[in-house]
Image: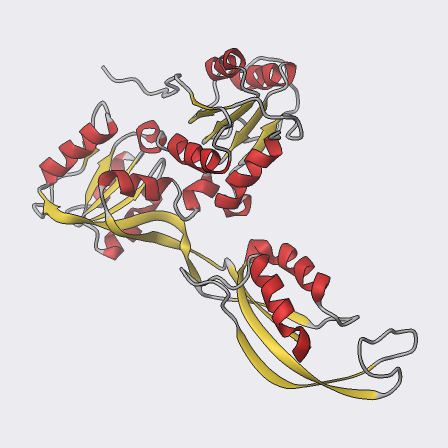
Amino acid sequence: MIRIKDVLKELEQYAPLPLQESFDNAGVQVGDVNQLATGALLCLDVTEEVVDEAIEMGCNLIISHHPLAFKAFKSLTGSTYIERCMIKACKYDLVIYAAHTNIDNAAGGVNFRLAELIGLENVRVLSPQKGALLKLVTFVPEVYAELVRTTLFNAGAGTVGAYDSCSFNLAGKGTFRAGEGTNPFCGEVGELHVEREIRIETILPAFRKSTITRALLSVHPYEEPVFDFYPLNNTWDQVGSGVVGELPEEEDELVFLQRIKDLFQVGCVKHSAFTGKPIREVALCGGSGAFLIKDAIAYGADVFITGEAKYNDFYDVEDRILLAVIGHYESEVCTKDIFYNIISKKFPTFAVHFSNVNSNPVKYL
């Protein structure tokens, strides 16, 4: 018996909600996640047609990339398609869930999928998140060091790139005097006590601070554990905006753009003037990624692919990089593949369907 919250838990382990940008509204949009899941319908956008499709298929979970609602409602009258979708979802006990910029920023997210489709190698994040890591330092009796370390690692601490269980440990002596009314783990009330301790240092994502604090307190033997969190200036290379990678071989600019057009089945590829240089280093960001153009140029990429860009963006790149715009919908529709792989891997017998509705609001002649 699979509940909707079980499915969403898998998605959020892959793309934690705290990875979303401040403007976003990823997560549950409407519905009771405690109900049994009858099936999931995957889409890029939630429209009235998509909601009807879910009802017809017997799916009580709709998973979209774009949130149905970005702003709070003061009323639900059915005056807009968003409100009508919400009302119908409530009427038919549907859950609508969105994984947006959190899965954009996640390792293995939308941009990594685009890079895979294009055939890029040595793919890494173009603009890693900053200020997203903390260092934890705590002090424990020697005999408890292994238990505390293991608990912290299991809670999500200690990962550096492809390495896990990372920590630094230093032996020393801790001192304390237990006051009246205390129940010290070691030593006597009113007497100065010296204990052989291990200083444990490890790293963690800032959004896991509460989880890891609870884990630490659950196994630390002291009545008043001492621990400190330190902010780090390190960038988190595993998550962030956009990616950059290399083609196995250089490609002519026109040949490359034609391949991109065919690959993503776009009505047209808008691009800046050709630079006259072959394409090898490719930077990209699905959706509205023009804010990363300067990062792509600074990296030395030959081309930057995104879903949307403004008129002046095509001027501003000059001959420093080739800018290619393939459409917002076209650059992110592959998100459904990511959803499917996450869910079907954990729940192989669960009914997961791809929406047949083309929700692209942009039409081509």
Q: Nearer the viewer, residue 140 or 2?
A: 2
**At 51% across and 27% down in the image, what residue appears?**
350
Picture quadrant where residue 42 is located: top left
- Is residue 84 at least partly visible in the picture? yes
Q: Nearer the viewer, residue 307 or 337?
A: 337
Give the image location of residue 182, x and y in percent.
88, 74
* Image quarter (top left, top right, bottom left or bottom right) of the N terminus: top right
**At 29% across and 29% down in the image, what residue appears?**
327
**At 92% across and 78% down in the image, what residue appears?**
180
Looking at the image, residue 117 sits to the left or right of residue 253; the answer is: right
Give the image location of residue 210, x and y in percent.
65, 56
**At 39% across and 45% down in the image, what residue appears?**
108
Give the image location of residue 297, x and y in percent.
24, 52
Q: How many numbered discs sit on the rendered protein?
A: 0
* Image quarter (top left, top right, bottom left or bottom right) of the C terminus: top left
Q: Is residue 112 above or below residue 71?
A: below
Outermost residue toward the right? 181
Visual colour scheme: secondary structure
Q: Is residue 23 above or below residue 139?
A: above
Picture quadrant where residue 214 is located: bottom right
